[in-house]
Image: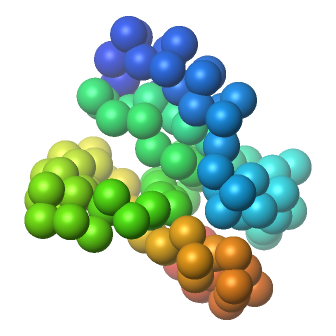
Amino acid sequence: MQPYNKKLKLPSRDLRNNMTDAEQMLWQRLRRKQILGLQFYRQKPILNFIVDFYCPSVNLVIECDGSQHYTYEGLEADRVRDEALAQLGLRVLRFDNGQVVRHLNNVIDEIVSHCE
């Protein structure tokens, strides 16, 4: 189990109940071990972050990014976050929401290739 801030349990539950359209679409394809029989978790606290999706068996984090991630501040925050997660041995895949909504099968193909 990865270390996490226990104060993030309630916010992560709230995020699971209020997922974006892109997150919901991707979750429908990740849940119930549909990809290579792998278990994914959604809105999972790790360190001081809540990652969108996490697969512990392949050390993979998947993020669905909205427009706020493409500002200077957002890009810098994501860089810091990705470095911290990498120090735990986790790989981070980032997709923008539009990419997930319009090209879901391509996103799934990329996830599968990182899991194999």
Q: Is residue 94 above or below residue 27?
A: below
Asked where in the image residue 33 lies, by quadrant, the reply is bottom right
Q: Position of residue 79 (x, y in %)?
A: 17, 61
Residue at x 49% of width, y 20% of height: 11
Q: Position of residue 65 (x, y in %)?
A: 44, 63
Q: Position of residue 108 (x, y in %)?
A: 69, 78
Q: Is residue 18 left or right of residue 88?
A: right
Q: Is residue 72 left or right of residue 82?
A: left
The colour style of the image is rainbow
* Quadrant where the C terminus is found in the figure: bottom right
Q: Is residue 12 above or below residue 67?
A: above
Q: Is residue 81 above or below residue 4?
A: below
Q: Position of residue 66 (x, y in %)?
A: 45, 62
Residue at x 65% of width, y 43% of height: 19
- Observer-nearest of 58 and 34: 34
Q: Is residue 86 visible?
A: no
Q: Is residue 116 above or below residue 60?
A: below
Q: Is residue 44 visible?
A: yes
Residue at x 39% of width, y 65% of height: 67
Q: Is residue 48 left or right of residue 13?
A: left
Q: Is residue 22 left or right of residue 37?
A: left
- Observer-nearest of 33 and 16: 16
Q: How many marks?
A: 0
Residue at x 49% of width, y 73% of height: 95
- Observer-nearest of 85 and 24: 24
